[in-house]
Image (cartoon, grey):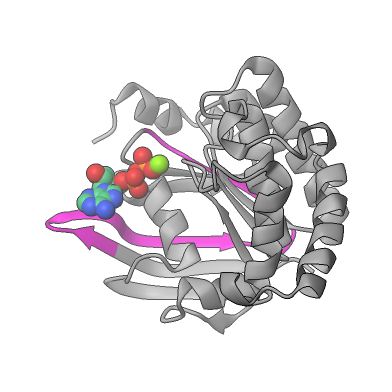
Amino acid sequence: MSLEIELRSVTKRFGGNAALDGVDLHVPAGQIHAVIGPNGAGKSTLFGAVAGELPLDTGTVLLDGRDVTGASPQRRVRLGIGRAFQVARLFPTLSVRDNIVAAVLSRQGKSLVFWSARAVRAARVEAEHLLDELRLGDLTTRLAGSLSQGDRKRLEIAMVLALSSRVLLLDEPTAGMSPEETEATVHLVRQLWAERELTVLITEHDMDVVFGLAQAVTVMYRGSVLCTGDPETVRARPDVADVYLGGVE
Ligand SMILES: Nc1ncnc2c1ncn2[C@@H]1O[C@H](COP(=O)(O)OP(=O)(O)O)[C@@H](O)[C@H]1O
Ligand SMILES: [Mg+2]
């Protein structure tokens, strides 16, 4: 089910500034892989490169060995790339359930105007399953715009899963969450990873989350990969600590 992700020598410049500068990344299928590094290191740009949101200056993006460097975001969604955004993209004036229904219908390529009653009924059934799985059942009729940060994030993940994603890209999923919500999100990601055999690529500021979840960690600094390794090895490296203290040049 899960997808392998590989980036080779990826460079992305904004003006004179290289947000990604020759980045190599390998995420084996089914791995939970965290990308960490200080603000401006290039983490979100890296996600954009995987999701196909940015034209690259150089380099190659491979999904299961298939070159998708020139493929549109829509095509990558069809191949299984699910992107949960740092700032959630929900329909705030629709209910929780209707947000998921909209995601299911969009996966099926149905335009808003041409939803048939039958397609909507089928999408509702699927939405009910996702609501259960993500424990959003109590919030079915709530407007998405009125949710807490944690519930919002769960809805966002449900919408990504409604797209039949095989890769979950989570860009700082616990930003703005309470400690309880953070813990629940970690639990949920681990559960979905196990049940759905996902590949998970996550950026995160909270080191407890990173070391509690990730099987491999990549540290970025100023657009480059400083190191990749298992969490304990990465944590013990003095240059990683230096990056966070701003000491590395
Ligand atoms: N759309 C953009 N236009 C111009 N500069 C950008 C854009 N997106 C990111 N950058 C720059 O690229 C660098 C990396 O940003 P980003 O990938 O958002 O880092 P991170 O997610 O690690 O904080 C930063 O210097 C940022 O200012
Ligand atoms: Mg970012």
Q: Is residue 16 magenta?
A: yes
Left or right? Give the position of 223 relative to 92: left
> Eyeballing the image, is 51 above or below 86?
below
> Eyeballing the image, is 52 above or below 223?
below
> Eyeballing the image, is 36 above or below 100?
above
Left or right? Give the position of 202 relative to 200: left
> Can you tell which quarter of the image residue 164 is in?
bottom right
> Can you tell which quarter of the image residue 125 is in?
bottom right
Left or right? Give the position of 5 relative to 194: left
Q: Nearer the viewer, residue 106 or 41?
A: 106
Q: Nearer the viewer, residue 167 or 229?
A: 167
> Can you tell which quarter of the image residue 120 is in?
bottom right
Magenta stretch? 12-38
- The secondary structure that most of the magenta stretch takes on is strand
Q: Residue at x 69, y 34 (%)?
A: 142
Q: Residue 99, can we see it?
A: yes
Residue 225: percent from left, percent from top: 41, 50
Left or right? Give the position of 31 relative to 75: right
Residue 145: percent from left, percent from top: 56, 35
Q: Residue 214, can we see it?
A: no
> Eyeballing the image, is 85 above or below 173?
below
